[in-house]
Amino acid sequence: MPPRPSPPTCGSGAFLFAALNILEPLYETCLDQMEAFVADLDRADPQHDPKRFRDFKDTLAKAAVHPNARYFTLKSIILNNLFGVDIMEEAVEICKLRLFLKLAAQVDPDSKHENLGIEPLPDIDFNIPAGNTLVGYATYADVKRALTSKLDFDNSLEIITKSAADLQQAFDAFRARQIEGDGSIPAQDKMALRHRLKNLEAQLDRHLAAAYGVSATNAAAYTKWRKSHEPFHWFIEFHGIMQDGGFDVIVGNPPYLELRQVYYRPQEFESLDGNAIHAMCIERSIQLMKPAGSMSIIVPLSLPSTQRMRCVQDMLEGHGNAWYADFAWRPARLFDAVNRALTMFIVTPRDDGKTSATGYQKWTSESRDGLVQRMSYVDVPRNRSIFWVPKLGDQIERTILDKVTSVSTKRNHFVSRSDHGIYYRTTGGLYWKVFTDLAPAFNVNGVSGSSSRETHFSVARREHVKPVIGILSSSLFWWWYTISSNLRDLNHADIQSFHAPKRALEGLDVQEKSEKYFKELSQNSTMLVREQKSTGRTETKSFKIQKCKPTIDEIDRLIAPFYGLSGAELDFIIHYDLKFRLGSDGDAAEQ
């Protein structure tokens, strides 16, 4: 059987619809080959044993009674291979409707036949149900742990498991009957199936509610809990698949939400402390996937870039091969309505798996076609002491990373409580970060103040202020920030973890070039004025970084020997992402 794709949060079905289009030519090829084998057999041996290729003949006979071969192919895929769940009932209905319309489009209405010659559309309510993928029992191990955590005097585990197996046989027969003949199913058969499923759901719901401290005997509290959590038990809803080891392929795009934004509380997830719903969806997907299965999901860039996602990285990489493709949201973005950087990861099974990543992909809408084909992956360390997956788009970057991280001193070696402050903004500056020795001017309605985005750290020695600013303004630091961070915020850790040779800070040449850079930065600054409804007129210091680029290059040339960078590596850093760092029009007003 071809793969069984399943999005744990299928939404309106975009990923299932794409899977349908991918599986269709595979089915068509199989049907063509069946026809060829049967035809060759008939020609070579007209008196052959009727049992030969009996399964091929039966399949071709089923296809023959449908309006056309493509209708049979799509119907077979929808019933046998596509499964999905979503907490929004409206999304589930739209998903099913899209699949139905795809089927209906394959038949030309014929007024000479009953129902215009269109056979009944398949019933896929049991393929794509509504429910909360993060609340409920996913596997047999989950059910066993829940039911045997207390004395199982009534033998509930065995009863529920047997009932689920019997129900699965009924599901299989239900789907098979829709492939045969005109696909019509008596309404009472579906009602009987739904009744048996509801009874099983109710038993597991009561056990699960108890784990939440809710007693089923308290009708009001129990009803409220079920409504808010909408439990979904993969173990019984897709019992046959789960007993067979899980789904072959999992694809999707889970909600990019924090735990505080939802009205339910998942339990027993290793990623729960990270408070990210998409992280728990990935963990659930791993539980639902076959050991030999594959997965690809699009999530925020936080997955390869933040401390709280390290446990999820370990789960994925523990499965086998892992690929991370990272995408910017400027100038163009993957999803028009999502203004954030994203990661598309793929995992496939392998005992001695490796981890690979792309660089931070930036593109314009005109160059979107072929974006994936142009990507290149670089192998990155799997046993990492760092929590982030380096975004490396070229093999030379792996060498640069090794050289930078071989420097023993980091920026935090020079940090100290003192009056020698270095100021920067935690957000803003999509293509560069600006550091100064004084808080940049900020006025609200003519009154001097400070921006909530402004922060600072201090160094122990005054003579280190300008060199630290120069090094943090280098293309080398921008490259480090790009490969290591979520590129959404400039956090204290992003700065303090940067490896900086002590000798580079104390060199007279670096000192002089840093002072030159700072003068140019001040000369090429203006006050950016905005009228905002909430605060009124704001004036913020803005800097024209492109005016300072020659001096920044000089700083990079001076610090490169301290890292042991070759000429080619230095040239790569100086020209790294140049078009986008300075803006496509060459005028980058950052900060």
Image (cartoon, rainbow, N blue to C red):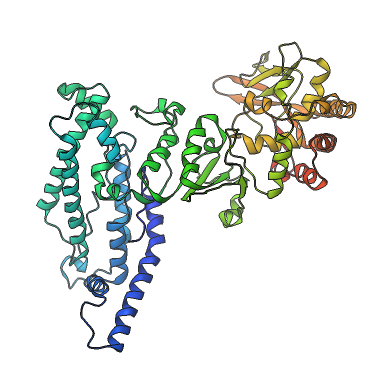
- The image quadrant of residue 383 is top right
**In the rendered image, the vertical position of residue 101 relative to residue 440, given as above or below:** below
Q: State whether residue 494 is above or below residue 175.
A: above
Q: Position of residue 274 (x, y in %)?
A: 46, 28
Where's residue 496, x and y in %?
A: 68, 25
Quadrant assignment for the N terminus: bottom left
In the foreground, 108 or 412: 412
The residue sitting at 59% across, 32% down in the picture is: 488
Q: Relative to 552, does residue 292 appear above or below in the rendering?
A: below
Residue 577 visible, this angle: no
| Rendered image quadrant of residue 514 | top right
Seen in the image, is 317 located left or right of residue 520?
A: left
| Residue at horizontal 21 percent and vertical 29 percent from the top | 207
| On-image quarter of the C terminus | top right
Q: Looking at the image, can residue 524 be seen? A: yes
For this view, does 455 lie left or right of residue 207? right
Depicted 580 relative to depicted 122: above or below: above
Residue 29 rendering spot, x and y as whole percentages: 38, 71
**Total numbered badges shown on the rendered structure:** 0
Of the pair 424 and 111, the residue shown nearer to us: 424
Give residue 465's position: percent from left, percent from top: 79, 20
Q: Residue at x 26, y 76 (%)?
A: 53
